[in-house]
């Protein structure tokens, strides 16, 4: 009986650690990240250099991009272009595409 209890407690502890690791929030994308630089990502779309990125138009932000995986009201959300990292809802990159609807 004592062994069973010990195994149970170790199982619970290991399960809790796994759950905590899985629930950890994704890192926020840094503008200096190589992938971010390659795609011209800005965490604040109002700071986009329109001479360097003429495709940018006022009002284009991650939350209204077809690739954004968060809710329109989320400050940060996922993007398949930056796997494992979250982009700013008010951000922008050169891959921006208008969300349908």
Image: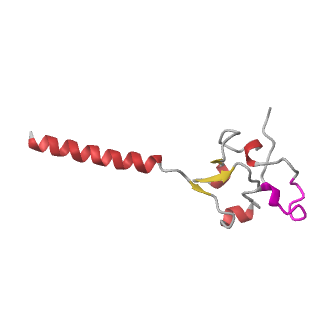
Q: Which of 55 and 76 is in front in this view?
A: 76
Characterize the magenta stretch by its predominant secondary structure. Answer: loop
Residue sticking out furthest to the left: 1
Residue 12, located in which quarter of the rendered image? Answer: top left
Q: Where is residue 20 in the image (x, y as percent from the top left)?
A: 41, 48
Picture quarter with the N terminus: top left
Residue 71, located in which quarter of the rendered image? Answer: top right
Q: Which residue is drawn at 30% across and 48% down?
A: 14
Number of labels in the image equals 0
Q: Which residue is drawn at 77% across and 42% down?
A: 64
Residue sticking out furthest to the top: 101
Seen in the image, is 86 located left or right of residue 52?
Answer: left
Describe the colour scheme in one phrase.
secondary structure
Q: Residue at x 75, y 59 (%)?
A: 42
Q: Is residue 52 magenta?
A: yes
Picture quarter with the C terminus: top right
Asked if residue 16 is positioned above or below residue 40 in the image, the reply reads above
Q: Where is residue 22 in the image (x, y as percent from the top left)?
A: 45, 47
Q: Is residue 82 magenta?
A: no
Seen in the image, is 97 located left or right of residue 78?
Answer: right
Q: Position of residue 2 (x, y in %)?
A: 9, 43
The magenta region covers 45-56
Q: Which residue is drawn at 78% across and 39% down?
A: 99
Q: Position of residue 89 (x, y in %)?
A: 70, 48
């Amino acid at each position: 009986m004592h062994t069973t209890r010990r195994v149970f407690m170790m199982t619970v502890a290991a399960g809790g650690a796994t759950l905590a690791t899985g629930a950890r929030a994704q890192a926020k994308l840094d503008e200096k990240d190589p992938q971010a630089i390659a795609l011209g990502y800005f965490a604040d779309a109002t700071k986009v250099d329109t001479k360097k990125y003429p495709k940018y138009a006022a009002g284009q932000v991650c939350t209204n991009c077809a690739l954004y995986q968060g809710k329109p009201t989320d400050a940060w959300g996922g993007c398949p272009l930056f796997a494992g990292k979250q982009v700013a809802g008010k951000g922008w990159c050169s891959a921006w595409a208008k969300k349908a609807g």
